[in-house]
Image (cartoon, helix red, strand yellow):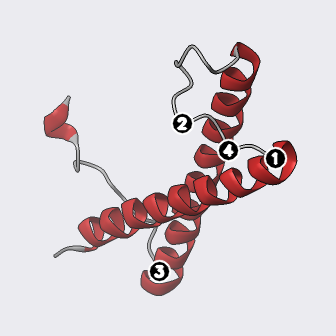
Amino acid sequence: MNHSKRYALLSMGAASAAGFAVRGALRSAWRATTDRDPPQDPSSPGVEWREALLWALISAGFVALGRTIAQRAVGAGYRAVTGELPSLEGQWADRQ
């Protein structure tokens, strides 16, 4: 397996793990703040618009932030170990 494929796998794994961890932390923070579970199905008629939109905004923003931080950390680690910048050039060219 070449370096770019290893980097891609590490980056995807770190992003997935970060997203999972952030979602768990957000659920705990939501419960602590509101004394309720976060909306499981924001489209449900029983969920108020304000609550659905707030949960969507908070969860999407923080999950994206966590994934980005994780991917950048993997990139920095890759560079420290290999002395090269990570490259994904050509990895998804066939999907366009």
Q: Residues within 10 Å of mark 1 (few under 14, many from 20)?
A: few
Cα distance, mark 2 to mark 3?
44 Å
Residue in the image at 81% along x and 46% along y:
35
Name the residue beneath numbered marker 1: 35
Q: Secondary structure at mark 4?
A: loop
Cα distance, mark 1 to mark 2?
15 Å
Q: Please identify the quarter of the rendering in which residue 4 is found.
A: bottom left
Q: What amino acid does circle 3 point to?
A: Gly
| In the depicted structure, whether residue 74 falls above or below residue 59 | below
Name the residue beneath numbered marker 4: 37
Indicate which label's residue lies in the foreground, 3 or 4: 4
Residue in the image at 50% along x and 75% along y:
79
Task: Check contact, mark 2 vs mark 3: CB within 8 A.
Answer: no
Q: What amino acid does circle 2 point to?
A: Gln
Picture coordinates of residue 66 (x, y %)?
A: 62, 55
**Quick one: quadrant of the C terminus?**
top left
Q: Which mark is residue 96?
A: none
Name the residue beneath numbered marker 2: 40
Cα distance, mark 4 to mark 2?
8 Å
Q: Residues within 10 Å of mark 2 (few under 14, many from 20)?
A: few
Q: Residue furthest bottom?
A: 81
Work out whether mark 1 precedes mark 3 in sequence or the reverse, and give the earlier one: 1
Q: Is residue 83 left or right of residue 21?
A: left
Name the residue beneath numbered marker 3: 83
Q: What amino acid does circle 4 point to?
A: Asp
